[in-house]
Image (spheres, grey):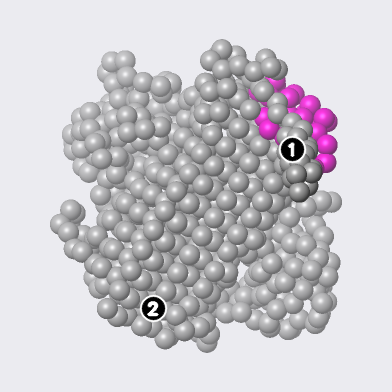
Amino acid sequence: MRIHKLLTACLVLLFAVAEVSAQRVYEASKYGIRPNTGRNVSSAVNRLLERIRRECREGEEVVLRFENGRYEFHEKGATQKVCYISNHDQVNPKKVGFDIDRLDNFTLDGGGADFIFHGRMLPVAVTRSANCRLTNFGVDFAVPHITQVTIVENDPRKGITFEPAPWVNYRILDDGRFESYGEGWSLRPEWGIAFEGESRRVVYNTSDVYCATRKVVELSPCRIHAPEWRDERLKPGVVVALRDWGRPAPGIFLAHNRNTLISGVRVHYAEGMGLLAQLCENITLDKFGVCLRDNDDPRYFTTQADATHFSGCKGKIISTRGLYEGMMDDAINVHGTYLKVVRRIDDRTLVGRYMHDQSWGFEWGQVGDTVQFVRSNTMEHMDGKCRITDIRPYDTDSCEGAREFLIAFDRDLDPEISERQTCGIENLSWTPEVYFAHNTIRNNRARGSLFSTPRRTVVEYNLFDHTSGAAVLLCGDCNGWFETGACLEVVIRHNRFVNALTSLYQFTNAVISIYPEIPNLEGQQRYFHGGSEGAILIEDNEFDTFDAPILYAKSVDGLVFRRNVIRRNNDYKPFHPIRSRFKFERVSRVEIGD
């Protein structure tokens, strides 16, 4: 028995040693990459990543570890990488800070570091990798491309006087235009988002603010008068984030990965989304933040667009214990992309095209994927489901940069599916389950969250605090953004919604808005969302609201709203055009109770 125990202990020790030896750790400081030096580390970091790619063996766990502190990344020395990124401007090549490509079992451990970027960069890209972890670091830019100003005077007849934030570089051009600038970029803003000075909430009933920054006069250093900028809603002390509509790159880009974990990572600014993932399987975000640094952060904004965005992913998307604030769009958006049928080659072969200018250039599907078709005008599914037997780019030599694909299917298609009417192709294989829980979403533009996937979606124990527009949106659109698709099983429970709908944006018909884009609703014969009893379940939530609409639903079969608490307050004056708690257009099997 003693010998058996001894042998067992030896085997345990042997396996432990083998496990330790299978993990290779690279300390960035040993390769000359140290914090707080002010030096550009772009070249050194990507040389080290290239070395790791050469040295690591299959199955080996690799850790790249940084010391706590600040690291500067500039465009010079960064990896140049062609990346076609969903829902972003397709400007290439991108200048990448961390190019984590084809590295399995890799961990980037920031050690609490701040990675600070300069110019116009893609900070972190993880591509064609499996079992990767990003942990414990922050992403920020030294000079954001959003220009923050504070209103100091507002005369309805003489215009607005404002002060740029201390970090803003600006100049007055010969024609009187106000221009901010940074390393390799400049901005002449005419639009902005207004925040309350103390609460940091979007100013009530402002939406996107037009900012006439022409014919300005510098009264004194950092004090500028804009005589044509007139808006009585912008009181002295209001902070305006001046911006344009460009989205060159997200803070973190994931593509063609499996089993990615991101924990304790904070994106404080990015010129596109905070995180964009496409064509990935299984992503977990835990304590991920698109957020300000702390309550004393002088900035009021984070990203130019969504905090997190998932396009054409599958498996499970899990987002828990996150903080999403100050961004210019949703905290989370999950969808696929419809291809528009632009040519019918024969009974089994079509040409499909990416339609939106910010969504093209990347792989859409693979042999064996299951697809279905939708009639854009009524958003009704057509001709059942079928499988892809062949798919290849039609207008280029590779998927990279392609707008059109030649797709063959395993059976004859209905003659109605052709370019003679607008039809979309939806890839059902690349659709994920979603678990979005214990997150805080606050003080942002547009909407709180957006889900468009046929697989089970659970939204629970979240705080939606002054999301400006709708807090939860279930959409589906084969006419504008061409974002799929119908939601068949959604659970929204144990959330608290505080004063949504302080401004009006697209799809903001209620706190929870089920709003597919359907040009011809009257001609629709079948429903878009749902399809079973209680397919969309909204229960045990708390609504604190100053206005009327709580739930709007269009083209839904199977909707339950029960055991929810609605509390009315007087924080703002009601203004929403919908004056009822519930508004339904073409819904079936609806239950409202308790």
Q: What is the quadrant of the C terminus in the image?
A: bottom left
Residue 235 placement: quadrant: top left
Q: Which residue is mark 2?
A: 560
- Of label 1 and label 2, which has the lower sequence position? 1
Q: Is residue 578 highlighted in magenta?
A: no
Residue 286: where, in percent of width, then height? Answer: 51, 47
Rate crowding at label 1 as few (under 14), some (14 to 19) or many (20 or more) other CA atoms within 10 Å: few
Dot 1 lies on which element? helix
Question: Quick one: 343 or 117, which is closer to the camera?
Answer: 117
Report the Cα–Cα distance between label 1 and label 2.
56 Å
Q: Nearer the viewer, mark 1 or mark 2?
A: 1
- Horizontal side of 401 relative to 558 (left or right) equals right
Mark 2, secondary structure of its residue: strand
Nearest the viewer among 575 and 539 is: 539
* Contact, mark 1 vs mark 2 (Cβ under 8 Å): no
Of residues 113 and 59, which is closer to you in this image?
59
Up the image or down, 292 lies above or below 594; here it is above
Density class for disc 2 (Cα within 10 Å; few <14, some 14-19, many ≥20) is: some
Q: Which residue is mark 1?
A: 13
Q: Position of residue 559 (x, y in %)?
A: 41, 79
Q: From which residue to which does the magenta span run?
A: 42-64
Q: Residue at x 39, y 42 (%)?
A: 326
- Measured as percent of width and height from the top left, residue 295 is found at 32, 33
- For residue 237, side relative to residue 108 (left or right): left
Q: Main secondary structure of the magenta part?
A: helix
Q: Amino acid at mark 2?
A: Val
The disc at residue 55 is none
* Amino acid at pointer 1: Leu
